[in-house]
Amino acid sequence: MTITNLALHIRFLFVGEGPFDVNLVTHLRRCCILAGADEAEDVTIPISRLGDRIGRTVPEKLTFALALEPNVNLVFVHRDADSEDPKPRYDEIREAIQVVTKELTHVAVVPVQETEAWLLLDEAEIRRVAENPSGTISLDIPSARRVERN
């Protein structure tokens, strides 16, 4: 028996480090669609706005977020690499997932400084995030070539 025409609906949670990390959600939603999902819905909770009431560790944030939104089928966890070697962050996220929920699919989002900087070169995306997509004031964004030299 072959199953065809099955709609894949992703309902995901994003757990980030700081208040600006939530800006990655639009990109993650797009990545889900590009990876084959028919729909991608985020139910992200602005954890960083809640302060220290929930804790700072990945397991504490995950536990809190999943208590509020338990019906997700994917979790994105963002941690900056803070160095050239992202492996410790991948390990940290994997261990946190194992502690909190063994069966939930997750994706570790671990940008290194050079990777994360590329988002800063996208003028249209900066204007969209700033809720001024039609803005005309010069943002004086450096060229990619200039960034690569630094």
Image: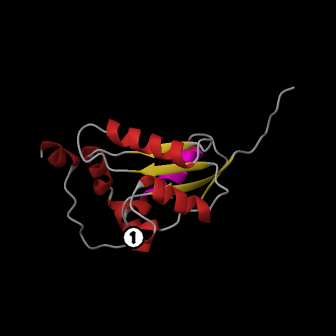
The part of the chain drawn in magenta is 24-33
Q: Position of residue 88 (x, y in %)?
A: 33, 39
Prevailing secondary structure class for the magenta stretch in the rendered image = helix
Total count of labels = 1
Q: Position of residue 37 (x, y in %)?
A: 64, 45
- Dividing the picture into quadrants, the one containing residue 115 is top left
Q: Is residue 131 left or right of residue 140?
A: right
Callout 1, which amino acid? Asp
- Dividing the picture into quadrants, the one containing residue 85 is top left
Residue 45 in magenta? no
Q: Position of residue 95 (x, y in %)?
A: 46, 41
Q: Is residue 25 visible?
A: no
Q: Is residue 91 visible?
A: yes
Judged from this view, the residue extending furthest toward the right is 1
Residue 25 in magenta? yes
State how the image is colored: secondary structure
Q: What residue is shown with label 1?
A: 52
Q: Residue at x 54, y 58 (%)?
A: 63
Q: Is residue 80 left or right of residue 142?
A: right
Q: Nearer the viewer, residue 34 or 15?
A: 15
Q: Residue at x 39, y 43 (%)?
A: 92
Query: Does residue 4 sit above or below 43 in this rendering?
Result: above
Query: Does residue 47 sit above or below 1 in this rendering?
Result: below
- Specify the quadrant that holds the N terminus: top right
Q: Residue at x 70, y 45 (%)?
A: 8
Q: Nearer the viewer, residue 37 or 64?
A: 64
Q: Is residue 28 left or right of residue 130?
A: right
Q: Is residue 58 left or right of residue 137?
A: right
Judged from this view, the residue extending furthest toward the left is 150
Judged from this view, the residue extending furthest toward the front is 99
User: Label 1 neighbourhood size at 10 Å, few (<14), some (14-19), many (20+)?
Assistant: few
Secondary element under disc 1, as helix, strand or loop, is: helix
